Amino acid sequence: MSNPSASAPQTPAIVLEDVHKWYGRVHVLRGLSLSVAAGERIVICGPSGSGKSTMIRCINRLEHHEKGRILVEGTEISDEPRALALIRREVGMVFQSFNLFPHLSVLDNCTLAPIRVRGLARADAEARAMEYLTRVRIPEQARKYPPQLSGGQQQRVAIARALCMQPKIMLFDEPTSALDPEMVREVLDVMIELAESGMTMLCVTHEMGFARRVADRILFMDQGEIVESGAPAEIFDRPRSERLRNFLNQILHQT
């Protein structure tokens, strides 16, 4: 006799339903709808001002959407305490500007949230922090402070800090855009390893080589809309819209 639960559809990791966002009179997100499966790796690209960062900041409730619904792990995101607690537990985010606390050591940056939010004992939080600092290949920097590190090292600390909460979903907002070119590769290598581990990931980036290698699906956004969505081969080799063709010609010529 078959097990009915074995074939039951899995709850999507993230769902957006007709999401709109305004800044004053500027309509930044225009009816976005999207479903992200658990373990799916999505790269979001598009010209500056297209709404990419705003979309993932709304998923993390760093920005509030005015219309539509966003669900994470089946729970609708709102200012209700239970929904906010879910976001803080299950969604990690890495910013382009690192956002580390400069007055705290690398180790303390990584243990602060697990102790305060997850309730971990300090010894357990430090052990977890060292595990993830080792994973991003900078355990020897644990006692240093962020200003003592290179940009690439600081971004790897930011990734380790997010992982210390053991989130189910990771959001990346142009994580290499503030780095010198020689530091980009070390951060992308860490992200590739993370993607290969099965983590659900949404990454805003212009690193098209990374997108082609890692993404299950690429979203191209322009003027607050998802213009095209598809596998890397579809997006790069068979773009359907003139907007995407122009974007690729520009970005690939730059790289």
Image (cartoon, rainbow, N blue to C red):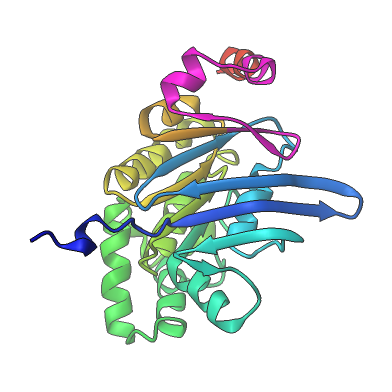
> Left or right of 129: which side holds 144?
right
Does residue 149 appear in this view? no
Does residue 137 appear in this view? yes
Give yes or no for residue 224 being in the magenta stretch: yes
Image height check: is 177 above or below 142?
above
Which residue of the protein is positioned furthest toward the right in this rendering?
25
> At x 68% / y 15%, what residue is drawn?
242
Image height check: is 247 above or below 224?
above
> Left or right of 57: which side holds 12?
left
Q: What span is colored magenta in the figure?
A: 220-247
> At x 35% / y 38%, what residue is drawn?
189
Task: Name the quadrant containing residue 252.
Answer: top right
Task: Name the quadrant containing residue 215.
Answer: top left
Quadrant occupied by the C terminus: top right
User: Where is residue 146 drawn, in percent x and y?
Assistant: 51, 60
User: Where is residue 65 drawn, in percent x and y?
Assistant: 72, 60
Quadrant occupied by the N terminus: bottom left
212 or 5, nearer to the observer:
5
Give yes or no for residue 152 being in the magenta stretch: no
User: Where is residue 32 drawn, in percent x and y?
Assistant: 66, 46
Task: Name the quadrant containing residue 24.
Answer: bottom right
Which residue of the protein is positioned furthest toward the left in this rendering?
1
Count of numbered tags: 0
175 or 102, nearer to the observer:
175
